[in-house]
Amino acid sequence: MAPPAELHAQLVALLPRLRRYARTLARNVHDADDLVQLALERALTRAEQLQADAPLAGWIYGIVRNAWIDEVRARERHTRLLTPEVGASLVSRVSGPADAEQLAVQAALASLPEEQRSAVALVLIEGLSYKEAAYALGVPVGTLTSRLARGRDALQRLLGEPEPQT
Amino acid sequence: MTFDDETVMAYVDGELEPLARAALEAAIAGDPQLQQRVAAQRVLRTRLQRAGAAVLAEPVPERLLSTARGARAPATILPPARARRPARRWSWPQGGALAASLVVGALLGPLLLHPPAGPVTTRDGRLLAAGALAQALSQQLASTQPADAAVRIGLSFRRRDGAYCRSFLLRAPSPLAGVACREPDAWRMQVLAAAAPGAAAGGYRPAAAAMPAAVTQAVDALIAGEPFDAAAEAAARGRAWNR
């Protein structure tokens, strides 16, 4: 297990990326940050469960994702209604208006089923290895790569060729 | 030699094992179609990374930084930054003790004035179910309860420490909802909240739909796994709600 001081430093370093991943799950910036907050609290509570050989990134991304699934289940439990989440608010609040390309990518990503969206986000955006991403999602590597392939195919169909740069 | 899509993707992701990578790289020079497939995957990867880059440049909110640094004990107190904001589901502390103390104050006085058959009592500093409420928590099944029952049982579930908990709606002396968890000698209140008039009046609404937000939030903070179905609820009663 990582010594506490080291774990804290690693979590701080991962924060910008955890916020980005949370935004592909939650509907808005506030919900995404609340999700990260909850995941941090859970991660620190469960630090002793972190195996020495476990990939830290896979572990903490997995906690973010499981916290999101808990939240979706809680909503379903109380409303008895299934409201599919359309999220992926990757557009930054502070970097000015997003360009059309960024909005198109965001919308395409948001339209994917969560399993494919998470696989794409963790590997292609967050840069996790297949092994780390599979660990985060709690699935075998083969399942991850098949979700990743389906997600990519859907994105290629939705996005087509990029607009020429002006 | 042909390469399937997952192989091309793994190549672009840097995940191809050395032998397969060498084979693909040997083939690519003389295979324009393969070149195109690799290029298309590279373009998609780049587009996704560009779309996500802006978030990384944002300043990270201080509340997240201080939590990550361990500046406060996790999940024990409400951070000041979020106490100023409307209560959100996942700002609730685990265990529900604080929730009970926040919600119960104004409600508790009148309830305790209904001895000996009032719905709650205190013992050893604990707020416990009593009378008809305690009886219903121990005996009544949500799956079979009559629509006009004086106490309506909502969800039954296990808390993170394994204890059984049940949410309930009470019609009298005033419309009241709450969550109680089983301790060895009694049902201990985790949260109590005023329910909307008529909420406990029965009818066709599931009890869960009529619960005040404070109660549903407490359930979220407490629950481990899923709420019980009828069979699990009956089985737990069969064990007298002992862990």
Image (cartoon, coloured by chain):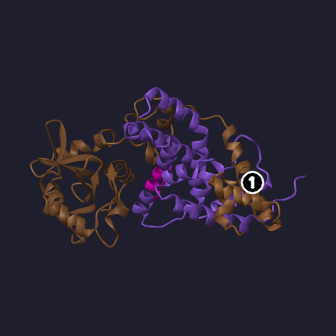
- In the picture, measured across the screen, residue A16 lies left or right of residue A99, that is left
Q: Is residue A70 magenta?
A: yes
Q: Secondary structure at mark 1?
A: helix
- In the rendered image of this protein, does residue B224 appear above or below residue A146? above
> Quadrant where the N terminus of chain A lies?
top left
Residue B108 picture location, percent across and down: 24, 43
How many numbered tags mark residues here? 1
Q: Is residue B75 visible in the rendered structure shown here?
A: no
Q: Nearer the viewer, residue B226 or B216?
A: B226
- In the rendered image of this protein, does residue B7 appear above or below residue B123? below
Residue A142 picture location, percent across and down: 53, 62
Question: Mark 1 sits on what residue?
Answer: B47
Q: Quadrant of residue B110?
A: top left
Residue A146 picture location, percent across and down: 57, 65
| The colour assigned to chain B within the rendered structure | brown
**In this view, which residue lies farthest toward the left?**
B116
Look at 75% across and 54% down and name the residue there: B47
Circle 1: residue type: Arg
Q: Quadrant of residue A70?
A: bottom left
Q: Is residue B83 magenta?
A: no
- In the picture, measured across the screen, residue B209 lies left or right of residue B234, that is right
- In the picture, measured across the screen, residue B139 lies left or right of residue B142, that is left
Residue B24 picture location, percent across and down: 72, 60
Q: Nearer the viewer, residue B150 or B84?
A: B84
Q: Residues within 10 Å of mark 1 (few under 14, many from 20)?
A: many
* Magenta highlight range: A65-72
Helix, strand or loop: magenta stretch: helix
| The colour assigned to chain A within the rendered structure | purple
